[in-house]
Each structure stands twice: as C-alpha cells, then as structure tokens.
Image (cartoon, rainbow, N blue to C red):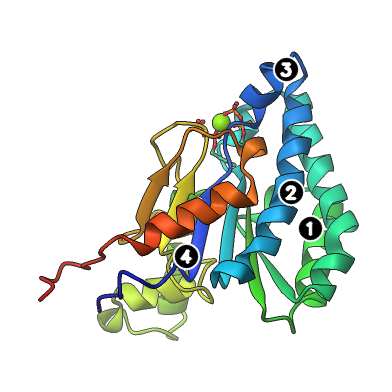
Amino acid sequence: MTKSPRSGPEHVAIIMDGNGRWAQSRGKPRLFGHHAGAKRVREIVRACPDHGVKYLTIFAFSTENWKRTQSEVAGLMSLFRRYIQREARDLLAEGVRVRFIGDRVRLDAKLQRLMDELELLTSKNDKVHLTIALNYGGRDEVARATKRLARDVKAGRLDPETVNDETLTRYLDTCLLPDPDLVVRTSGEARISNFLLWQSAYAEYEFIDTLWPDFTRDVFAGIVRDYAGRERRFGAVLT
Ligand code: IPE
Ligand code: IPE
Ligand code: MG
C-alpha cells in the first residue's frame, strides 16, 4: 500500500484561507476578498488536468463559519448562489463533475436547489471531480454518518458485528471519493479546522503563507511538484 514517491497527487484538498486578511490589507471589506478568492477557484480547477489531479476538494464554508457576522454569512451565501449560476455552463463544457459535501439542510432552499441541479447537470463528466465542501465539518459528517448507520442497524439492514472502518467510510459524504493524497492550507495557519478528519488519516500536508486570493496556478504547480518528492509509507518500512 505504498505509493511511488514520483507520482503526483490524484486527490488534492484545499483549505482556502486568508480571503479576509487579503481584503483588509487593501483597505477593503472582507467580502471583496471572498469574491477575489472565488475567481481563483476557476483557475485552479482548470490547472488540475495539467498535473494529473483528478480530484480537487475545496473548503468553502465550515459548520463553524455561521459564527461570523450575519452580513458576512449572507454575502457568502449570495456568492455561492451566483458562483453556481455563473460557472455551471463552463464547468459542464470543461468536463468537470461537481459534488457538494456537508450538511445541506441549513442552507437556503434556493442554494440547495442550485447545488442539486449542478450535481445532476455535471453527473456524466469525468475529467476533473470538483467537490465543494459547504456547511461542512468533519465531526458533523462523522456524526451524521453514524446516525444513518445506527438507523440501518435498527432497521435490520446492517449487522453491527460486521461494522469496520470501510463500513463507516461508505456512510460519509465523501463515499464516492478516494482519500486525499495532499491537503493544502493557505494563509499561514497550521491547523485543519475540522476538514476531512477521517479521510486525511494518511494525507500529506502542505501549509503555505500565500493568502487564497494570491494562490495562482504557478503556486499550485509548485506544491504538486514538491509532493512528488515525498515518500509515503502508510506505516510500512520501505525497502
Ligand atoms: C476563508 O477566508 C474563506 C472562508 C472561511 C469562508 P477567511 O474569511 O477565513 O479569511 P481570513 O482567515 O479571515 O483572512
Ligand atoms: C476554514 O477557515 C474554513 C474554510 C476555509 C472554509 P477558517 O478561517 O474558518 O478557520 P479558522 O477559524 O481560522 O480555524
Ligand atoms: Mg480564515
């Protein structure tokens, strides 16, 4: 179960952080930074095929981000709606399959509808798998998965004696995705803030100082190149 150090990451997950500081350093409101950040997403999705990255998962809004001011939350929700409306056609044409992970129930009805439609619209695509984590928290995801698993046990559909880590994996929002090979966090913070806790057990991490709105395709290329030089052992001793 070891991977050749020379191969690139198949699945890159990114904690897109630093939008607020980027805007504030320019004397602009935080939402200005979120808009600049959303533009970068397009550039990075497009760069994925050049580097053999088949899966890109991005953290857009956490279960903890509701603690922000009402106006920032509303601005972000409006940005997500507009992003989907504006990008849907190009994502479809460029072969991108979009999925959302996280708890949708708390999102407004219109946003939920746009998310469902975009997933359906792009469901036949296979060039790049873009997963957007929206109202996502790793602990929340494991709790929701456990709830569904417990319901299946109660209904007699699942034998509790057979439950192992693969069983739980099947109940997660990410059930159709491979584990991330590389998790990147921008903005200089060295923490994972409840992102993909279960799935990143053996991921490589890269924490960089660049703020998300400054994260160009060249920065991305550099990180992917560095990854190829790493040695992944998965607990084994390499011979
Ligand atoms: C990341 O940027 C985007 C979201 C969390 C929605 P931040 O808004 O966290 O930016 P900083 O960390 O305050 O600079
Ligand atoms: C993590 O960033 C969430 C997203 C990037 C969507 P935060 O800015 O919310 O994380 P903390 O609060 O610094 O841990
Ligand atoms: Mg932040």
Q: Which amino acid does label 3 sit on?
A: Arg
Q: How crowded is mark 3: few (under 14 residues within 10 Å), some or many (20 or more)?
A: few
Earlier along the polypeptide chain: callout 4 or callout 2?
2
Instruction: Give the mark toward the camera: 1 or 3.
Output: 3
User: Mark 4 to mark 2: distance in Å?
Assistant: 19 Å
Residue 75: which quarter of the image?
top right
Q: Do the residues labelled 2 and 1 touch (CB within 8 Å)?
A: yes
Q: Nearer the viewer, residue 31 or 128?
A: 128
Tag 1 residue: 112
Tag 2 residue: 107
Earlier along the polypeptide chain: callout 4 or callout 3?
3
Q: Is residue 205 left or right of residue 71?
A: left
Q: Under 8 Å from ligand 1: the CB of mark 3?
A: no
Q: Do the residues labelled 4 and 2 touch (CB within 8 Å)?
A: no
Instruction: Give the mark toward the camera: 4 or 1.
Output: 1
Earlier along the polypeptide chain: callout 4 or callout 1?
1
Tag 4 residue: 145
Q: How many marks?
A: 4
Q: Which of 101 and 52 is in front in this view?
A: 52
Q: x, y (%) of residue 74? A: 79, 34
Tag 3 residue: 26
Q: Under 8 Å from ligand 2: the CB of mark 4?
A: no
User: Mark 3 to mark 2: distance in Å?
Assistant: 31 Å
Asked if residue 125 shows in the view, the reply is yes
